[in-house]
Image (cartoon, rainbow, N blue to C red):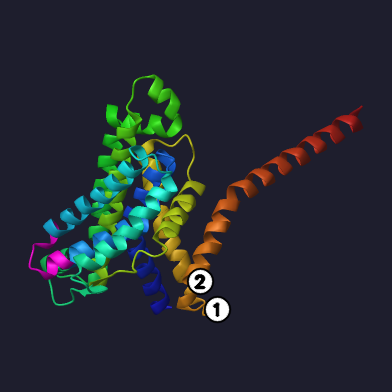
C-alpha cells in the first residue's frame, strides 16, 4: 500500500511539471484555435537546451530561462512559416518539429542524449536549501512555477494584446475587420505557447537528470489529454484563472490515472501510448455521454409528469 501511495505521489509529481506543457497546448489549441505540432520538438528543445547549458557550467535558473526563450524562438518560426509563407498550421508545425529534431541533436553536441546527473539543477538547489527529498523538492518547485505562470497568463490575457489573441482565436475575420493584425497575434501566441512547452521540457529534464532527443514523442497527445480532462471538470462560467488552474490539474489527474492503471499490473510500462489514446478517447466522449444522459433524464422526467397529469384527469 505504501509503495502504491508513493507511486501516486510520483505520478502527481510528474503531472505538475507536465502542467506547463498542458498550459502551452491550451493556448495554441483552445485560445488560438491553432493545431500546433511544434510541441514535440519544442518540448525536447527545452530539455536539450537546459541539459547542455547546465553541463557546460551555466547557472541552472538562467539555463532554464534560456530554454524558455529557445522555445519562444521555435514558436516564432512556426508563426512566421504559417503567417508569412501562408503554409497551413499543421504543416507549419510539422516542418518546425522536423527541423528541431536535427537542431536538438546539434545542441546536445551531436549526441542523442545529455546526462546531467553529476551537476546541480534547480531541483537539487531546493533539496540542499530545505534539506528535503527530491520528490518534495520537485513538487514545491513545480507548484510554485505553475502558480506564477498562471498568474502571469491571467494578467496577460486581460491586457489589450492578450484580448486580441483571444479574439483572433474566436473570430479571425472580425478581428481583421477591426484593424487587428492577426498575423502578429498568432505569432505572439505561438511564441508564448512553445515557450511554456520548452519550459516544461527543461523542468522534466532536470527532474530525470538527462535530456533525450526522443523525450518529446507523444507530448502533443499528453498535452491534449490533460487539456480535455481539465475541461471535463470545468464550467464555461469559471473565471479565466480558474480555467487555467483546471488545465494544470488535468495534467496531474492524467498522470495519476496512468500510474494507477500501470500499477494495476494489467498493463506494462510499454503500454503507455495505448493508455494515453484510451484516456483521450474517454475524455473526448465524456461530455457527449453527459449530454446524452442529461437529455434522457429530462425526457424520462417529462414522460413521468405527463403520465401523472393524464392520470389526474
Disc assigned to residue 99: none
Snapshot quadrant of residue 151? top left
For the residue carrying disc 2, how many other residues have a C-alpha within 10 Å: few (<14), some (14-19), or many (20+)? some
Q: Residue at x 31, y 58 (%)?
A: 99
Snapshot quadrant of residue 3? bottom left
The x and y percentages for residue 212 are 29, 71
Sequence-first tag of 1 and 2: 2
Tell me the residue that label 1 is attached to: 266
- Helix, strand or loop at label 1? It is loop
Tell me the residue that label 2 is attached to: 261
Q: Residue at x 68, y 46 (%)?
A: 293
Pointers 1 and 2 in contact (C-beta within 8 Å):
yes
For marks 1 and 2, give the CA distance.
Answer: 8 Å
Q: Nearer the viewer, residue 225 or 313?
A: 225
Instruction: Let me know if residue 59 is in the magenta part.
Output: yes
Quadrant housing the C terminus: top right
Amino acid at each position: 500500500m505504501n509503495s502504491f501511495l508513493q507511486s501516486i505521489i510520483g505520478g502527481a509529481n510528474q503531472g505538475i511539471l507536465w502542467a506547463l506543457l498542458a498550459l502551452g497546448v491550451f493556448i495554441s489549441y483552445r485560445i488560438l484555435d491553432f493545431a500546433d505540432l511544434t510541441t514535440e520538438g519544442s518540448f525536447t528543445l527545452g530539455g536539450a537546451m537546459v541539459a547542455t547549458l547546465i553541463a557546460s557550467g551555466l547557472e541552472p535558473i538562467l539555463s532554464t530561462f534560456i530554454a524558455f526563450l529557445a522555445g519562444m524562438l521555435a514558436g516564432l518560426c512556426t508563426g512566421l512559416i504559417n503567417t508569412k509563407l501562408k503554409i497551413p498550421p499543421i504543416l507549419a508545425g510539422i516542418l518546425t518539429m522536423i527541423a528541431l529534431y536535427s537542431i536538438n541533436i546539434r545542441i546536445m553536441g551531436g549526441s542523442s542524449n545529455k546526462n546531467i546527473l553529476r551537476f546541480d539543477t534547480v531541483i537539487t538547489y531546493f533539496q540542499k536549501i530545505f534539506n528535503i527529498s527530491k520528490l518534495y523538492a520537485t513538487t514545491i518547485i513545480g507548484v510554485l512555477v505553475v502558480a506564477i505562470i498562471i498568474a502571469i497568463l491571467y494578467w496577460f490575457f486581460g491586457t489589450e494584446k492578450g484580448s486580441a489573441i483571444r479574439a483572433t482565436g474566436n473570430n479571425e475575420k472580425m478581428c481583421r475587420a477591426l484593424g487587428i493584425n492577426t498575423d502578429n497575434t498568432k505569432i505572439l501566441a505561438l511564441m508564448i505557447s512553445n515557450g511554456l512547452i520548452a519550459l516544461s521540457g527543461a523542468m522534466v529534464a532536470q527532474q530525470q537528470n538527462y535530456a533525450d532527443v526522443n523525450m518529446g514523442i507523444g507530448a502533443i497527445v499528453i498535452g491534449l489529454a490533460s487539456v480535455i480532462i481539465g475541461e471535463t471538470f470545468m464550467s464555461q462560467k469559471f473565471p479565466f484563472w480558474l480555467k487555467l488552474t483546471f488545465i494544470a490539474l488535468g495534467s496531474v489527474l492524467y498522470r495519476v490515472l496512468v500510474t494507477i492503471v500501470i500499477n494495476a499490473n494489467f498493463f506494462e510500462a510499454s503500454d503507455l501510448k495505448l493508455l494515453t489514446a484510451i484516456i483521450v478517447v474517454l475524455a473526448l466522449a465524456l461530455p457527449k455521454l453527459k449530454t446524452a444522459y442529461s437529455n434522457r433524464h429530462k425526457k424520462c422526467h417529462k414522460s413521468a409528469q405527463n403520465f401523472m397529469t393524464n392520470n389526474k384527469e
